[in-house]
Amino acid sequence: MMRKVIIIPVLLFTLVFSALEVKADVNVSADSAILIDQSTGRVLFEKNADEKSLIASITKIMTAIVAIESGDLSDNVKISNHAIGTEGSSIYLTKDDQFTLEELIYGLMLRSGNDAAVAISEQVGGSEEGFVHLMNEKASWIGMTNTHFDNPHGLDSDTHYSTAYDMALLMSYAMENDTFAKISGTTSFKADGRDYAWANKNKLLTSLYDYCNGGKTGYTKAAGRTLVTSAEKNGHTLIAVTLNGPNDWNDHIQMYEWGFKTFAQTEIQSKGIFPFEKKAGEVIHGEINRDVYYPLREGEFEHIETKTFLTENDPSIDSHFAKKVYYLNDEKIAETSIYRVSDTEKEEDHYNFWSGMLSAISHLFGDHDG
């Protein structure tokens, strides 16, 4: 049976000012660029972010996450002649090399080994072509609607392309994986099969920006310099992408510094038990079991509105009986579920509220020890 919903609009604050636009004091060298908040996906800055472009070795972010999710990291990888013969950047694989899949992913991400990319693809996908199919499936699943992969390394092809926005989506997704985040954020790594360490080519991570915690570089003559990075400051993580950026290190630092200065992770909903009016005169209680945060710039909080959607299901039966949706300038930015609460929980919440009030009053008027 189809559920019916009742929409209850709630205005958090009276709107006094007109809708605010995000105007960035940022000037990047790249043809395409974007800065997003990782946890919410909010676009903080963009320049030609949906323009399809060659992407070079930042392709390997997808290669790495597909291999991590689909392969066994402890497996020894057989090195084929096809992998050894791959042109471009290399970790100089030979037929005699003995590397685990995990070690090759380090070589892929830190040194951008094209030979490692092909060896990984053959190990995990059965063939390079089979692995590329997995890459495109993952891109579709993530929502990378303007992306197509032809290979696992990023060498130029007319049908191998992406956008700054799509690559930001990919990096945001990949950084949720602990193994990927660890590898991407490693400054150097020594594999058992080498007597020297692989140093990460991402200078933002190794020397230029203290808050950088991951990323991938790329370059071909046709694509120019491409760069995807992530940075975390005071618990706030941002993702930056530049395509064909001749001054990409500074582009990323400039975007990060502006983003961290301009936007703050702001609590727009505290967890707790709240009354909701289901019908005129009929109030039910529901629990929001998590705090909700969203990156906001100064003056935006006053423009947030909410709507609560209540089903006609019996809250005593259906534990998830409603949701609360948050809007900024009429655009949906977040939502959270509302759950059934028992009479005991309501009484405890009521008791905790008044207990807290009495404690505060007692402290205010000096009715305490010491």
Image (spheres, rainbow, N blue to C red):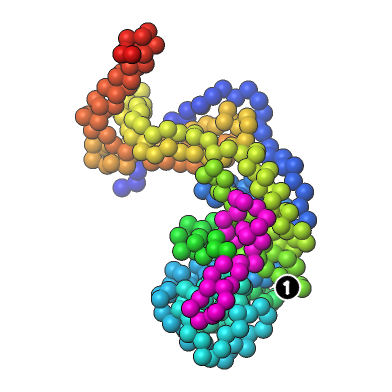
In the rendered image, residue 325, in percent from the top left (x then y), is placed at 47, 38
**x then y, percent, for residue 290:** 39, 39
Q: Is residue 6 left or right of residue 346?
A: right
Q: Residue at the spot x=67%, y=33% of the render?
A: 20
The residue segment tinted magenta is: 188-215
Query: Is residue 368 in view from this perspective?
Result: yes
Badge 1 density bin: few <14, some 14–19, many ≥20, Cα 10 Å: some
**Residue 201 relative to residue 125: left or right:** right
> Relative to residue 65, is residue 269 depicted above or below?
above
Indicate whether 193 appears above or below 365.
below
Q: Quadrant of residue 289?
A: top left
Residue at point 64%, 74% (across, down): 154
Residue drawn at 36 percent across, 9 percent down: 366
Q: Nearer the viewer, residue 23 or 77?
A: 77
Left or right relative to 90: residue 273: left
**Image: 88 above or below 38:** below
Q: Residue most toward the left?
A: 344
Residue type, numbered disc 1: Thr
Task: Give residue 175's position: percent from left, percent from top.
Answer: 51, 58
Q: Mark 1 points at which residue?
A: 220
- In the rendered view, would you say 106 is above or below 82? above
Work out whether residue 146 can be spotted: no
Q: Which residue occupies 74% across, 63% down?
A: 244
